[in-house]
Amino acid sequence: MRNKRAGKIAKVKVGINGYGTIGRRVADAVLKQPDMELIGVTKVTPDYRIEEAQEKGINVFSVSSSRDFEAQGYLVKGRLQDMLAECDVVVDCSPKGKGSENMAIYSNYPNLKAILQGGEKHDITGFSFNSDCNYGQAAGRRLARVVSCNTTALCRIISTLNASFRIRKVRATIVRRSADQSESEKSVLNAWVPEAKKGFPSHHALDVKTILPDINITTLAGEAPMTLMHGHMLFIELEKGGRQADAHGVADALQKNPRIMLCSSQKGLTSTAKLKDMFSLNGRNGNLYEVCVWKDGIGVDSDGEIGLHMAIDQQADVVPENIDAIRALCGTADRQASVALTNRALSIGNSPCKPMDGRVLSATT
Amino acid sequence: MRNKRAGKIAKVKVGINGYGTIGRRVADAVLKQPDMELIGVTKVTPDYRIEEAQEKGINVFSVSSSRDFEAQGYLVKGRLQDMLAECDVVVDCSPKGKGSENMAIYSNYPNLKAILQGGEKHDITGFSFNSDCNYGQAAGRRLARVVSCNTTALCRIISTLNASFRIRKVRATIVRRSADQSESEKSVLNAWVPEAKKGFPSHHALDVKTILPDINITTLAGEAPMTLMHGHMLFIELEKGGRQADAHGVADALQKNPRIMLCSSQKGLTSTAKLKDMFSLNGRNGNLYEVCVWKDGIGVDSDGEIGLHMAIDQQADVVPENIDAIRALCGTADRQASVALTNRALSIGNSPCKPMDGRVLSATT
């Protein structure tokens, strides 16, 4: 990125610190971007994911000493610091809380931009990012935080609907998956675990306000015994004076955003498991970058209030946001261009789940 | 009940048609009432539950021919019709839809009163029952329908809060258990199944209005992979002019109803599984007749709107309602007396889960 030759912009050099659920998917996505180069990824523990990376030709760096890695028969390219020295941007995909700690390391590289994930507090970067809502505000910044999967989904839906209707208040409930697929030690069994300890509203309402400060939103959440996706149930109250909604109008408004996918129970997509199954063998590796809204579940009650069900792939919906955040921080593309590039590279909008009325969405916004 | 001798009212003779999840629990509860006599229960299929009933000294009647029963080595007391001929009231606990079909049989017994469950439509009985809301309206009727577990819980919470605050609108989401414990062939595995097919609002909103026609309520629901209890997340918007709420005031209002139990994450009750565990060895056979509200999850947002989490034992919360419905239809006790009698017999309000501020509720309302 730093060197311009004959008007051609060099590729942005990206490092990924942490090769877990999100890091692996951001790495795959970076490899698909024509304007990015993946310098490498880091690993803390020497496990099977190193082989996964190396088979893809990705350089692996160790966060601490490489001795443990060698003991397991893994050769690493160097240390985290070696990777950072070569990068324009680091995408921090380390576990919750660790990203904030890593800021001290990143500050040793004056030209390095850093992107944290939604597990970190907003104040650490002072700027929370969502492609649909505030892409332009990233310009000139060194730091951004891509908000969590649930907050990303809420921001995407709310901003898209707010462009067609005037929202008075959003009431959202979140049925969280209790663990990711690989977190076999963490999953809840056969119980509902309300997020009661921290009171009401849940943190999601506050987090949405880091992106959409003017939206009135209140949230409740809990954990269900599942690993695949989160489920959301939303009540969206509209301003009395504005355009009134019907189910068709809501579906139409949502379809304008290629990162929102309308699906249908009538077509057999009755659950999050069916959604994941649909995306398991179509070249998307099971990743649902889109927020999935059940078209047959959209409705308007007697007060004119919208209700809808949606599902969020906690492993995937923030991936295109991270890719856009790289360009937004580096200033290499405006929002429209970046979103189009990301969507094309990740086949977003070309999903097998076509809009329900037969229209085919373009891969660009 | 029909014969009064020396001012003493004879026991109400109760038959239970269907000895499944609800029927077995209503039978146990009837056995504990000082003013009721259990004539018997019916079974459609000859299975292990017959032994359960007979070990308790309960007469078992067969719905169809007794030949299948004899083939399995079970002796029955007679047919359904034999049981009905002896009863003042039949509590129909047969599977969804079957109760409505049974009405033709019940109509052959002019003095027989019948109670259906929430799986049947309101129109079949023309009267839906909830002890807290409309006990008195049962007088003189032959038929009543005890609303479903979720609707019972919503009516209990809404009517209790509406006595202390003026509710403008309730928005409720329901995280349903996908199957009861014994329905091993029905349970959902590792997926969220939104109730999207039937649109918005879900049927629960309409069902609450059969009991509380003046309450503005809208609902969304889905099924989670669990068997133990339902989870609810509620937003309760208050009228602007009325008394405003704080978390303490809401908890205080709820505690006035002994069929609402406040529980606390801080005391280890972090999930529905913990609640069931708490009630497994205390003489209640795992039955939570009370609606359980997490005290630490009660809050009020910046608009003054109440948010709360609650859990509902789908096998148990309608049991005291069925018992009260028997007395309400037969006119053998007024609401206060019936609720006190039922609560005392079932140890409701004497639960080990004491109100969080140390006050001990009496077993009466």
Image: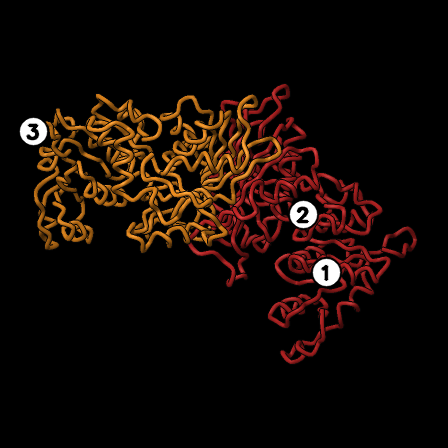
Chain colours: A red, B orange
- Mark 3 element type: strand
- Mark 1 element type: helix
On-image quarter of the C terminus of chain B = top left
For residue A15, which quarter of the picture? bottom right
> What is the spatial separation of the Cα atoms under label 1 and label 2, in whole angstroms?
18 Å
Number of numbered tags placed on the structure image: 3
Residue extending farthest top: A241
In the image, taking residue B292 as reference, residue B338 lies left or right, namely: left
The residue under label 2 is A147
Foreground disc of the pair 1, 3:
3
| Residue A358 on image: x %, y % | 56, 34
The residue under label 1 is A101
- Residue B28 or residue A346, whichever sits in front: B28
Residue occupying the point 18% across, 52% down: B52
Q: Amino acid at mark 1?
A: Glu
| Residue A80 on image: x %, y % | 75, 67
| Circle 1/circle 2 CB separation < 8 Å | no
Q: Which mark is residue B5?
A: 3
Residue occupying the point 60% across, 31% down: B303
- Residue B334 or residue B119, whichever sits in front: B334
Label 1 vs 2, first from the N-terminus: 1
Residue extending farthest bottom: A71
On-image quarter of the N terminus of chain B = top left
